[in-house]
Amino acid sequence: MSSSTGHANAKPAVKPVSPLFSTGPTRKRPGWTAGALDTASLGRSHRATHPRSRIKDCIARIHRVLALPDDHIVAIVPGSDTGAVEMAMWSLLGARGVDVLGWEAFGKTWVKDAVAELKIEPLTCHEAAYGDLPDLSKVDFAHDVVFPWNGTASGVKVPDGDWIPDDREGLTICDATSACFAMPMPWSKLDVVTFSFQKGLGGEGGHGVIILSPRAVARVESHTPSWPVPKVFKLHKKGGLDTALFEGATINTPSLLVIEDAIDALEWAESIGGSDALIARVDASFAHVRAWVAGTPHFAFLARDPATISPTALCLVVSDPWFTNLESAVQADLVKQMLALLAEEGVALDINAYRDAPVGIRIWGGPTVDPEDIERLLPWIDWAYETIRAAHRQAA
């Protein structure tokens, strides 16, 4: 799609149908309306038969859509993905040494938890700057390993699961909040997986989901943490696994509206063909962005290794030499102006880079976003950049 018609910087002729490209909460599924939600559970006790059956239905649909192995179990927990990851860390770690990987804001939160809160020993932290991935060959799988599959703040993901050995001694605890429903997941390589509804499913915040393999269940049943475990992080009950959590019970009062919204998204996912269809939508959007980056003189992926570029958290930096030679404060202001232009045109909202990341833009390319809207957005980004560049040069 051409970024201009007529003179050099004319506005593109077609806008995205929706301007919503936030990385979380993300766009609702196509055709979503609040009226589509089942409201029979609202205002009732979450322990009553019908509301609990809806939580169980949500768990069953997660299992089906993700095509989880039969022996993996699923629970809906408090605190979004952060709560789910920290539940795994507080409940499961401490039986052996730990390796933690962090290459952007969220992974580095798990590093901080391990260092400053749990004070685990022995502990090895593998860190990298924005745009890079730590050296995966240095990870010690005799230890438990905590890592994000996809760095939402940097757009850098692990390339695959081949670096994780089948005969590992420790557990792998994977924060997959911006990967589940959007990328193939090698379940045999992952002992604990977490996500939240407001990423891949376009759901609402507040709840996390934790998936346990049999190896993770065995750890719960054989290990008692040496540190205090807050109630909202407890996987244990009476010396074993709290199995009720995986059968529709919750640690504290859930939002039944969030559950119904997640069920709606999962029903849509099943209706279009499940995980394969969701991933195909992501791949189509990613193909548009890759082709555009290859052709534009203005932008590049923040991820430096092509094998690690995230197809969901599409993090871009301005690569135009004119721009990169400007002072950092000027760069930040120009990108802010560019994003304001896109918002004023009703083309894109909330595509600013993460606050700690390099100056740039971040577009969500998850499964609830129509690939055609990604394709329509890209010429507008070129137009906005060319507009602010021309204005800055004229002012100078």
Image (cartoon, grey):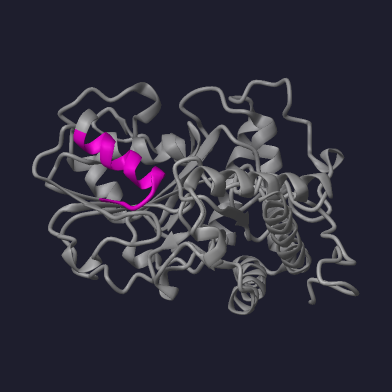
Quadrant the N terminus occupies? bottom right
Residue 236's x, y, as percent? 30, 32
| Above or below: residue 165 compared with residue 385 | below
Residue 318's x, y, as percent? 56, 61
Q: Residue at x 71, y 54 (%)?
A: 388
Residue 305's x, y, as percent? 39, 72
Write down the quadrant of residue 14 in the picture.
bottom right
Q: Residue at x 51, y 53 (%)?
A: 326
* In front of the other: 304 or 40: 304
Horizontal side of 296 relative to 82 (left or right) equals: right
Residue 224's x, y, as percent? 18, 33
Which region is colored magenta?
101-115
Q: Is residue 108 magenta?
A: yes
Q: Residue furthest left?
A: 122
* In front of the other: 391 or 92: 391
State how many labels appear: 0
Horizontal side of 57 relative to 187 (left or right) equals: right
| Above or below: residue 233 compared with residue 285 | above
Which secondary structure class fits the magenta region best? helix
Q: Residue at x 47, y 49 (%)?
A: 153
* In front of the other: 350 or 115: 350
Q: Residue furthest front?
A: 396
| Above or below: residue 334 compared with residue 297 | above
* In front of the other: 386 or 90: 386
